[in-house]
Amino acid sequence: MTTPVTHPFLQVENLARAYPSPSGGDAVTVFDHVNFRIHKGEFVCVTGHSGCGKSTILNILAGLDSATTGNVFMDGREVSGPSLDRGVIFQSHALMPWLTVLQNVEFAVKSRWPNWNKHKVREHAMRYIELVGLKGAEHKKPSQLSGGMKQRVGIARAFSIEPKMLLMDEPFGALDALTRGVIQDELLKICAETQQTVFMITHDVDEAILLSDKIMLMSNGPHARIAEIVNNTLPRPRERSAIHKQPHYYPIRNHLVDFLVSRSKQFGALRDAPDAPSSPTVFDPDDLLEPFELTQPESVVVPVPPIGKPHIHLVNA
Amino acid sequence: MKKLTLSQKAGLLSVGLLAVILLVWQLATLPEAKGVAADVDPEYAALMGGGTSTAASSFPTPAAMAQTVWDKLSDPFYDNGPNDKGIGIQLAYSLARVLGGFVLAAVVAIPLGFAIGNSRVFYQALNPYVQLLKPISPLAWMPLALYTIKDASASAIFVIFICSLWPMLINTAHGVANVRKDWLDVSRTLEVNPLRKAFRVILPAAAPTILTGMRISMGIAWLVIVAAEMLVGGTGIGYFVWNEWNNLSITNVLFAIFMIGVVGMALDSLFGVLSKRVAYQE
């Protein structure tokens, strides 16, 4: 998948965040030297172990938190606070329980376009409720919905304000595997339709491979940083049922799992070398594979996973 | 035997309890036949209303009580001058004072509670005052109120105001301070203006806690109004109780106690209904 080579839509420069030590000593630097760029229309996933500051980075991008040092620029302007330009999908869905599904989405739509009349607001909200497949449930309260349906409302709400960028903090972490799969497929479809720029945190390697164009791997904190960037070269449109037959699938997957299992710890050694290189290495599966494999997707040269290999899903502690 | 539902069992037990109470009451108020002690001069006993006739207690029998309740409730709004008004009028006076004081307290407590709940500075600055003023019996304010306001009825309203204030203030502050951060973050990312955030996010989120505070306040206000009206006199159910005690009409005192309970229960269930309407399930 090609991304237009223009000036980066989102640029993060030398971001660092330190928290005062609970014991009163030196401040603890969770992450530092974080640099990355996201182009318009790109879907970027971030993964790494708990405590590396992924959520903090997302909150800084959202404007809900602030960095100790460093800057975030979106569309050439510095991010200094929350904005309707950046929609956020929270892990806990964060729906207002006293409002119905429709009212929750309408609340967002009315915030985005305060001058719209009631009819227009409703129409717009309904369009996004239909998009996530919740037509018929629009007058239900969140407490009457399943976890997956609640998260869909959260997605509808975030998309309804038509943000320039979408930020998702482990949106499917609390869902069961089946529901997660269904909603991932829907998200894939919606993002393809809307050409949405997305920054998403996930612990699920398969989710990252299915959805993203680029996967950023963070080393362990403290002094975490973006250690590697993996270009996800799997062609779109992607199908959950067929994606593992792509020749690039297992090289990418193995690379990610290896990182999470072993290499993420080695990068922890960087804390002793504060001026260690801050530019992450880029992994591109195109460099690994022989050309003939690309033309013969059915050939079984790529390593086949042992049957019954456990699904790797690192859950936030 | 057929199985009874839970509420049927409870209902039967309630009726049984009522029967026991009425029976004990009836037995306790049976006229004492020839209740004159032998060593009392019969002439003196006759003068005292005893003697050969049976000595009726001031405490009514259940039947006499029922008759009184019926008489009073069938004509609740008569007005035969300052010391003889229908129970409806007396209760209306009390309710008006409670409502006045309560509404005034709500007007002050809810916005102030919002401010305290929203700001740590405000909270810490006002907390010592709240902690100091909260445990003061509302009736202790009465002399001060009478001296400054110089009006008995307004003083009663002030006492209701001061006793209703604290639960509403504390609960509002608590409810506002504990609004889920997620909801606030949502409104921040949606760039919701402060007024809209207050009314569309914080108020509905805190409403159940605020309403609990209002319910507690109303309960306390209804307790305090009886005592306050005994002090200020003139009108109201509290004055009625004290006046009937001075008349030695235990029947009327009992009737008033019963009515205070009925109205208090009605007020509480009104707030129960309101609570249900603002409740939400997460």
Image: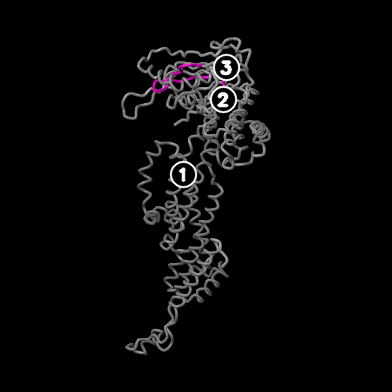
The image quarter in which residue B120 lies: top left
In this rendered view, identify the residue nearer to me: B90 or A71.
A71
* Chain ID of residue with mark 2: A
Q: Which residues are magenta?
A: A211-229
* Chain ID of residue with mark 3: A
Q: Tell me the SS state at disc 3.
A: loop
In this rendered view, identify the residue nearer to me: A282 or A106.
A282
In this rendered view, identify the residue nearer to me: A257 or B198.
A257
Residue A189 located left or right of residue B260: right
Q: Which residue is mark 2?
A: A166
Q: Please, what is the three-letter code of the amino acid marked with disc 1?
A: Thr
Q: At x 64% / y 21%, what residue is drawn? A: A237
Label 2 Cα crowd, 10 Å radius (few <14 / some 14-19 / many 20+): many
Q: At x 65% / y 31%, what residue is drawn? A: A131
Whether discs 1 and 2 lie on one chain: the answer is: no
Q: Is the C terminus of chain A in the top left, top right, bottom left or bottom right quadrant?
A: top left
Q: Please, what is the three-letter code of the amino acid marked with disc 2?
A: Leu
Q: Which residue is mark 1?
A: B172
Q: CA distance from mark 2 to mark 3?
A: 27 Å
Q: Which residue is mark 3?
A: A248
Residue A227: x and y in percent read 45, 17
User: Quick check: can you spot residue A169?
Assistant: no
Q: Tell me the SS state at disc 2.
A: strand
Label 3 Cα crowd, 10 Å radius (few <14 / some 14-19 / many 20+): many
Q: CA distance from mark 1 to mark 2?
A: 35 Å
Residue B48: x and y in percent read 38, 84
Against B270, is B118 above or below?
A: above
Q: Is residue A225 magenta?
A: yes
- The nearer-to-camera label among 2 and 3 is 3
State yes or no: discs 3 and 1 in contact (Cβ < 8 Å): no
